[in-house]
């Protein structure tokens, strides 16, 4: 597995297209792999996320089974002569995971549930959670099946901060896609390293093609 | 020398220093005449009575949360509908928070602090339609106006602080000391609130910025997953 970071040059026209449409970014990420097994392989898949660490600074994070080649992204939306991308081996970190470890984490996800629109509806469909507490509960409740728990704060509430909660709409072919996304920041404790490893490489929740589900960890300050 | 600190917060505030005729403006920060008027109301000093003890007070204000300017277009008729009053534009600051400091002799400030707990007349933020939210007084503190405004914790609302950086620069507007280089003059030094003969004098003012730490800032922005993978 590899973790890749690519900095987007937001002043370029190509970047506007990629940043405004998860469908376009999905296609660009897919095109970064010459061999299909580098993109998706043995229950692991490629996941990506856009982070904005500072105004007008956008990072694309990419976790993939194989080494990506982002030359096309650099040409469309990067700095072709000075900066490319940064790819690191993810395996050593994944092997180091132990129960009880505390990490700061970030996850952009699509908190949703499925149900029927009304009692007469024939088919079930997915609905995004819109309220902040529902979105927080969504992650806290499914943390267990991904091998971690969200740490508690001093006041007993989960150590979570939600930001960039938004409803995205973009076109996909002839239709439109509507996605509710939220970015979670917080502290987690690893309970089951095997399952947690699967969460890091396989993602959490739905809409993984559209920049959701990638969980990353960093030292807990 | 002590300082009485006031938190001026409410859904609406309006602090005009140059309102004339049908256009009733607001400054972006509380005026000295507005705040001393509020203290006089707490004390129970009537408009026609002299302000004697309040005249010598030193004044400063810090803009903790600037709020938004709101315009109210007012159309008024008499009760029987026959007289139509002039159309007026009234300006307000919506959702603003200010920290005001009043410097002066110790016993006077303690008296004013007590009066704010049990005001003689209703208190309002610049205009009668603008009631304050919560307690106004933050108590009497040691030091001078400039120092207390410079280091008192940020009073803005939680939602506002969460969106801000971990260090913020707040604007501070206070009376100029003798011989100090002034930024501007404002016509809001109250002499008399007598409705028949209202009087204000020009007041030399210093504007500066103070840096305050914000413990509610969103620290989570510096999440760097690469740091675990060797830099």
Image (spheres, coloured by chain):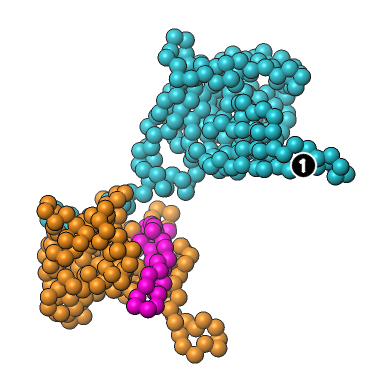
Q: Is residue B186 left or right of residue A102?
A: right
Asked if residue A53 can be seen in this view, the reply is no
Corner quadrant of residue B118: top right
Q: What residue appears at the point 48 percent right and 36 percent down from the top-left corner? A: B64
SS for tag 1? loop
Residue B6 rendering spot, x and y as whole percentages: 56, 30
Asked if residue A77 can be seen in this view, the reply is yes
Q: Is residue B182 magenta?
A: no
**Colour of chain A as rendered:** orange
In this view of the protein, which residue sits in the foreground, A79 or A162? Answer: A79
Q: Which residues are magenta?
A: A157-184
Q: What residue appears at the point 66 percent right and 33 percent down from the top-left corner? A: B23
**Residue B119 position (above or below residue A13):** above
The residue that mark 1 highlights is B76
**Colour of chain B as rendered:** cyan
Residue B147 rendering spot, x and y as whole percentages: 43, 23
| Majority secondary structure in the magenta region | strand
**Residue A133 position (above or below residue B95):** below
In this view of the protein, which residue sits in the foreground, B196 or A106? Answer: B196
Quarter of the image with the N terminus of chain A is: bottom left
Corner quadrant of residue A176: bottom left
Q: Identify the chain of the residue marked 1, using the numbered disc in the image.
A: B
Residue B139 rendering spot, x and y as whole percentages: 55, 29
């Amino acid at each position: 597995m590899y973790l890749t970071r690519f900095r987007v040059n937001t002043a370029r026209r190509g970047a506007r297209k990629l940043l405004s449409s998860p469908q376009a970014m999905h296609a660009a990420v897919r095109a970064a792999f010459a061999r299909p097994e580098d993109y998706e392989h043995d229950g692991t898949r490629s996941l990506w996320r856009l982070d904005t660490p500072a105004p007008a600074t956008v990072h694309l994070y990419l976790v993939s089974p194989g080494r990506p080649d982002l030359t096309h992204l650099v040409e469309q939306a990067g700095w072709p002569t000075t900066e490319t991308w940064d790819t690191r081996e993810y395996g050593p970190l994944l092997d180091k995971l132990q129960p009880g470890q505390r990490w700061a984490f970030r996850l952009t996800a699509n908190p949703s549930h499925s149900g029927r629109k009304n009692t007469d509806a024939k088919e079930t469909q997915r609905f995004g959670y819109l309220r902040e507490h529902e979105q927080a509960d969504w992650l806290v409740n499914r943390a267990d099946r991904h091998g971690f728990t969200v740490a508690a704060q001093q006041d007993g509430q989960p150590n979570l901060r939600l930001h960039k909660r938004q409803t995205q709409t973009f076109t996909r072919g002839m239709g439109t896609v509507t996605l509710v996304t939220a970015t979670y920041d917080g502290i987690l404790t690893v309970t089951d390293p095997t399952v947690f490893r699967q969460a890091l490489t396989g993602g959490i929740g739905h809409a993984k093609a559209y920049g959701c589900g990638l969980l990353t960890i960093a030292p807990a300050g | 020398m002590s300082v009485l600190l006031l938190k001026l917060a409410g859904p609406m505030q309006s602090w005009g220093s140059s309102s004339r005729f049908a256009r009733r403006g607001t400054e972006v920060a509380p005026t000295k005449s507005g705040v001393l008027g509020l203290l006089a109301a707490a004390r129970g000093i009537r408009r026609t009575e002299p302000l004697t003890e309040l005249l010598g007070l030193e004044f400063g204000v810090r803009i903790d949360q600037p709020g938004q300017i709101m315009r109210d277009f007012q159309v008024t008729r008499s009760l029987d509908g026959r007289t139509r009053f002039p159309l007026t534009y009234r300006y307000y600051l919506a959702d603003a928070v200010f920290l005001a400091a009043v410097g002066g002799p110790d016993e006077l400030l303690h008296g004013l602090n007590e009066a704010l707990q049990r005001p003689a007349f209703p208190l309002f933020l610049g205009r009668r339609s603008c009631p304050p939210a919560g307690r106004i007084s933050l108590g009497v503190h040691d030091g001078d106006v400039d120092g207390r405004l410079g280091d008192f914790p940020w009073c803005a609302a939680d939602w506002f602080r969460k969106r801000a950086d971990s260090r913020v620069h707040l604007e501070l507007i206070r009376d100029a000391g003798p011989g100090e280089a002034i930024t501007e003059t404002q016509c809001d030094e109250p002499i008399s609130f007598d409705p028949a003969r209202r009087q204000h004098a020009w007041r030399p003012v210093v504007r500066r910025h103070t840096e305050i730490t914000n413990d509610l800032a969103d620290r989570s922005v510096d999440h760097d997953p690469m740091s675990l993978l060797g830099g």
